[in-house]
Image (tube, rainbow, N blue to C red):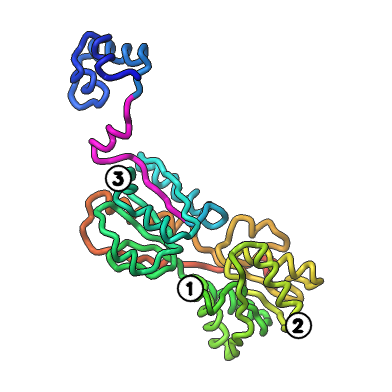
Amino acid sequence: MVRMADVARAAGVSVMTVSNVLNERVPVGEPTRSRVMAAVEALGYEVNLTARHLRAGRTDTVAFVAPSFHDYFSELADEIAPLVEAEGRHLVLERTSANAEQEIEALSVARLQIYDGVLLSVAGLDLEPLERVRTSKPIVLLGEREVPERFDHVRLANESGARLATAHMIERGSRRIVALGCSSGSAHAMTTDRRVGWEDAHREAGLEADPAYVVPVSDYTSHAGREAMLEVIASGLPVDGVFAVTDVVALGALSALADSGLRVPDDVQLAGFDNLDMSRFVPPGITSVDVNHKGVAQAAVELLHRQMSGWTGPAEHVVAPVRLVVRGSTRGGA
């Protein structure tokens, strides 16, 4: 392994001079600098960038830690990356599989040393372990879990989004709308909030939000959405609308409805949540709540940058607005 002392010997200078050239701490004359760089190249010396960054107090990297990088999170990462890169930093992705231990590990002192800041999408952690996290490193939390007031936090307007989608189908004639994946027994705040929005839309329309229409899914995949929807159809429960907790679940429901001979939207209207790119292209196009990935990414990165710039004021809790994008899966859609 080539050492800095070897470079100094080959260039005929001191180790300190080599360090000054490589770290650009003090000016070095051009002839000396050229001699050092020629020795570096000839010997194949590799600069320890990690050590250099740690000495400088920054690593030029930001971590985005998420449960997975499929669907919603992949689109969000695509929006976060250019914002981080515009500040001269690199984005590093870490996956937790919604595991609480892995999420808390992402906030450990050892892990935080290698990043300038962390964007953590909380899916497994509860309030109590987050309260115990003690660090001066910049951290912004994302997601629908309850978090300590002292953390900057960006979440979605889940209730109002679900209310928009459900009210839209009610206005277009649906009266028996399944809340697919909005299980009342779920510990996930996102599903609870979206169920509340489904209930609010019914109440505002003077209709009963029948708990029999709140249908759980085994997980948030298209396969699980399809299986749950097939069970609803087989049960004989009359259905003329489906509000799916995510677009991915909605895609599974769409498959089940088609295989059961039910036409969308003529027989059953369907709406999802997240407005994923694929929702535009799956016939007849899935009406969906747009969560504004760009706005969520911008809010999160701005809060992180504010901390990295030395902000010592109170934390900010941002609720990102949503809107409904109407497509062919609901009546009147394009």
Residue 116 located left or right of residue 64: left
- Identified at 27% across, 32% down, the residue is 52
Question: How many numbered discs, if any?
Answer: 3
Q: Name the residue under label 1.
A: 187
Q: Check contact, mark 3 vs mark 1: CB within 8 A.
A: no
Give the SS element for disc 3. Answer: loop
Q: Check contact, mark 2 vs mark 3: CB within 8 A.
A: no
| Mark 3 to mark 1 CA distance (whole Å) | 32 Å
- Identified at 32% across, 53% down, the residue is 108
Name the N-terminal-most of marks 1 and 2: 1
- Identified at 63% across, 65% down, the residue is 249
Q: Residue 113 carries which label?
A: 3
Q: Name the residue under label 2.
A: 236
Q: Position of residue 69 (x, y in %)?
A: 53, 52
| Mark 1 to mark 2 CA distance (whole Å) | 28 Å
| Amino acid type for the residue under numbered disc 2 | Gly
Q: Where is residue 145 in the image (x, y as percent from the top left)?
A: 42, 68
Up-down: is 235 above or below 32? below
Residue 25, magenta (yes or no)? no
Q: In which quarter of the image is residue 56?
A: top left
Is label 1 or label 2 in front? 1
Residue lying furthest right in this view?
261
| Amino acid type for the residue under numbered disc 3 | Gln
| Residues packed near mark 1 inside 10 Å, few (<14), some (14 to 19) or many (20 plus) | few
Q: Nearer the viewer, residue 303 or 10?
A: 10
Give the SS element for disc 2. Answer: loop
Residue 304 located left or right of residue 320: left
Start-end of magenta stretch: 47-66
